[in-house]
Amino acid sequence: MSKTVFLNIDLKDGQHQGVQVDDQHLLVARINGEYYVTSNICSHARVLLSKGKLRGTTIICPLHGARFDITSGQCLGGPTQQPITRYRAQVETSGIMVTLPD
């Protein structure tokens, strides 16, 4: 089962922001005009990735430097090989619709 939520977020290219929906921490990033939504929790250290740096399509964990591809959730290096979850996002007129698991 899944649920769809609406995020009223407007980012400029290269920006990212953490948001919380119920008990889920999400990372929203805009890259080359596209919005991407992933888990905001590092799969290694359980810290908020939104506090890290976004370099191109890579978010870097602020604690131990784990690197994740925002477009796929794949881990690119660091102290873990575990990916982060990527969620389906669709841009609407006044925000972003995101499909989350229940």
Image: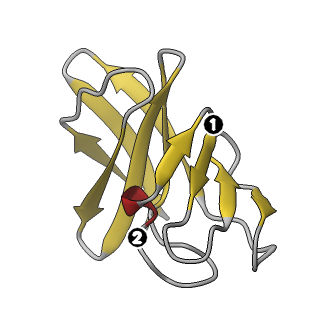
Q: Residue at x 29, y 27 (%)?
A: 11
Residue 7 bears which disc, if any? none
Q: Residues under labels 2 and 1: Cα distance?
A: 17 Å
x, y percentage for residue 27?
Answer: 41, 53
Q: Quadrant of residue 70?
A: top right
Tag count in the figure? 2
x, y percentage for residue 17?
Answer: 31, 47
Q: Is residue 14 above or below residue 47?
A: above
Residue 57 bears which disc, if any? 1
x, y percentage for residue 77?
Answer: 80, 63
* Helix, strand or loop at mark 1: loop
Marks 2 & 1, CB-CB < 8 Å contact? no
- In the displayed orientation, state which residue is furthest to the bottom: 45
Which residue position is annotated with label 2? 48
Q: Residue at x 75, y 56 (%)?
A: 74
Q: Say how the picture is coloured.
A: secondary structure
x, y percentage for residue 97?
Answer: 34, 36
Quarter of the image where the C terminus is located? bottom left
